[in-house]
Amino acid sequence: MTDAIPQDWIARLTAIVEEAGAAILEVYNTDFEVQTKGDESPLTQADLAAHRVIVAGLEALSPQIPIISEESAPPPFAERAGWQRYWLVDPLDGTKEFVNRNGEFTVNIALIDGSEPVFGIVGVPVQEKVYVGDVRQTNPDQRAYVLHKGTSHPLQVQRQNDRQGPLRVVASRNHGGERLEAYLSEIDALFAGCERTPVGSSLKLCVLAEGGADIYPRLGLTSEWDIGAAQAVLTAAGGGVYTQDGAVLPYNTKDSLLNPEFLAVADGSYPWIEVLPRFPEK
């Protein structure tokens, strides 16, 4: 696939994400129960309801493209290694945020081509927002934007050389610990301070894409479905997600679907890997 996503697909994908968001909010507004999965992460009926909506919608849209969702068992690498394209889905990223009722949870659909997220759509049901990023779109007005209550606003990251003041960092509400604190202390000494904002779920990458922060250092494990859609949005807006060696974070290249630690940045043209310290040793 070398072209942008067809506009009629984007309209249908937006409708799927909004329908999944509505299914999530139906549960959100009740006294829902929380189960625990094998990896100790929480699971609610909202995760499963959104999963059913998305899978049904994608199968109707593109029956020829396989799907990997957090809420279904992924096929073995021997099978998916032969896939050129597939949908990567996290029906409800930020279940802890959902359980805590802070609104910072998202619906995520990415299209992976080769090892690259080339399209992503991220819904934020409580905020009534849908972020869209099409990495291969040449029309700047259609490349990265956010829909808010039916109105489209373009996404454009802020260039680091145009900024002054402290480095703005988004970080997880639930992960980090001593290594992250040590890393942020190093940053504080290198720049004119460090402003830290806790944000849940894949919304962190969308904040970068909107120009609301400069970097998101992820020290700790994530799965590919956690950030695939938001990575496409951020990349389309001018940012990027990189490993500690400076490589673009890849997808579907190994048996495990766990990501290495990474650095997400708003300005993909700035030499962050050279400027910032390496993550502290584990």
Image (cartoon, rainbow, N blue to C red):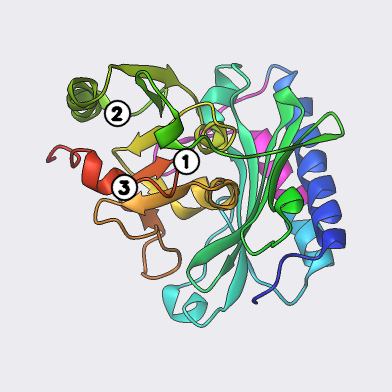
Query: Tag 3: residue type?
Result: Pro
- Residue 214 in the image: above or below residue 13: above
Q: Earlier in the sequence, mark 1 or mark 2?
A: 1
Eyeballing the image, is 162 above or below 165? below
The Cα atoms of the two marked residues, 1 and 2, are separated by 21 Å
SS for dot 2? loop
Q: Amino acid at mark 2?
A: Gly
Q: Residue at x 55, y 79 (%)?
A: 83
Which residue ends up furthest to the left in the rendered image? 281
Quadrant where the N terminus sits is: bottom right
Residue 271 is tagged as 3
Q: Residues in magenta?
A: 32-53
Q: Is residue 136 left or right of residue 217?
A: right
Residue underneath mark 1: 37
Image position of 152 (left or right of 265): right
Identify the residue at horizontal 15%, vertical 37% (top origin): 280
Q: Is residue 51 magenta?
A: yes
N-terminal of the pair, mark 3 or mark 1, is: 1
Secondary structure at badge 3 equals loop
Q: Is residue 78 above or below residue 86?
A: below
Most distant residue in the front direction: 162
Q: Is residue 27 visible?
A: no
Q: Residue 113 location, x and y as percent? A: 57, 71
